[in-house]
Amino acid sequence: MEEQLSLIDLVLHASLTVQLVMGILLAASMVSWYMIVQRIIYFRNSQDDMIRFEEQFWSGIDLSQLYREGNERAADGQTIVGIESIFRAGFKEFSRLAQQQGMDSEAVIEGSRRVMRVAMLREEERLERHLPFLASVGSTSPYIGLFGTVWGIMHSFRGLANATQATLATVAPGISEALVATAMGLFAAIPAVMAYNRFAAKVDMFTNRYDTFVDEFSSILYRQAYALRSREKKAG
């Protein structure tokens, strides 16, 4: 309890500039922790949804039925994101292009792949949300804390000019107050850097899975487009 009170006293008796630095670092730390928790929940839900959809997709279900089930959930107000969003974008474009007469299979698949790539970029933006802020906190917080420390030490040594006797006890409180700013800078930076590295690896994992799915789904659509055009030629 005494240590907690002494730390509070150091903050309260610090100079205005150092207190401002501490306030900025405290706010940055609180916001970054909120974003860390939010990203953990988002990535966990996204991974569960991806595993569920892939199991359903490769179970042999009819793609039209899978698309209709997504329409029903979207009509109920559920937001469809992730790999299912990529599937829906590609299947919708494939269905539209396949109905156009005179368009060959290559053009149909190329159009579907372009739409899926656009959908994948949107999903990557969702995955990377808040990561730039965490990177900024992790890279700048130590320097902001160091600025507060340097300013506090300068303030302490300027006070020695008015002191009749310069002793360690004279400057120790001011230096201690200044060092709190460095500690707070590290406290804000370390979790942000660790979370950013972890989330960046997660984004790469999701991106690779999305890219693999686009290639696999394109192969399935190509076979369907080729079969459709073959039937049309025979009927014609």
Image (spheres, rainbow, N blue to C red):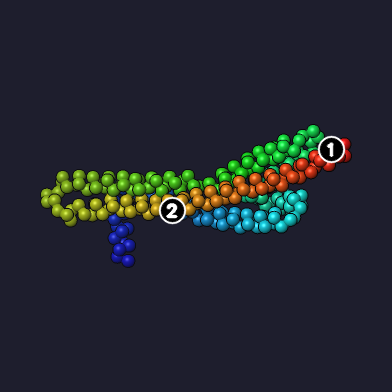
Q: Quadrant of the C terminus?
A: top right
**How far is the residue under mark 1 from the one under mark 2?**
58 Å
* 156 sits to left or right of 191: left
Using residue 194 as the reference point, say whether residue 112 is left or right of it. Answer: right
Give the residue at x 63% y 40%. Answer: 118
Where residue 46 appears, as percent x and y from the top left, is 59, 54
Q: Which residue is mark 1?
A: 233
Report the residue at 67% width, 52% height from top: 78
Residue with the mark numbered 2 = 194
x and y, in percent, of residue 154 in the image: 23, 45
Local SS, label 1: helix
Few, some or many C-alpha atoms within 10 Å of disc 2 (few <14, some 14-19, many ≥20)?
Answer: few
Residue 75, x across and y down, in percent: 72, 50
Is residue 158 visible to the viewer in this orientation of the structure?
yes
Residue 191 lies, in percent from the top left, at: 42, 54
Q: 16 or 114: which is nearer to us?
A: 114
Nearer to the camera, 77 or 114: 114
Considering the numbered disc 2 on the image, is that residue within a helix, a strand or a loop?
A: helix
Quick one: 133 or 203, which is closer to the camera?
Answer: 203
The residue under the point 31% across, 62% down is 5
Label 1 vs 2, first from the N-terminus: 2
Q: Residue furthest right?
A: 235
User: Which quadrant, please, contains the N terminus?
Assistant: bottom left
| Residue sitting at the far top | 102
Q: Could you classify mark 1 by the number of other residues whose Cα lies within 10 Å: few (under 14), some (14-19), or many (20 or more)?
A: few
**Amino acid found under the numbered disc labelled 1:** Lys
**Number of the front mark, 1 or 2:** 1
Which residue occupies 46% across, 46% down?
133
Could you tell me if residue 85 is visible in this image?
no
Q: Residue type at mark 2: give it.
A: Met
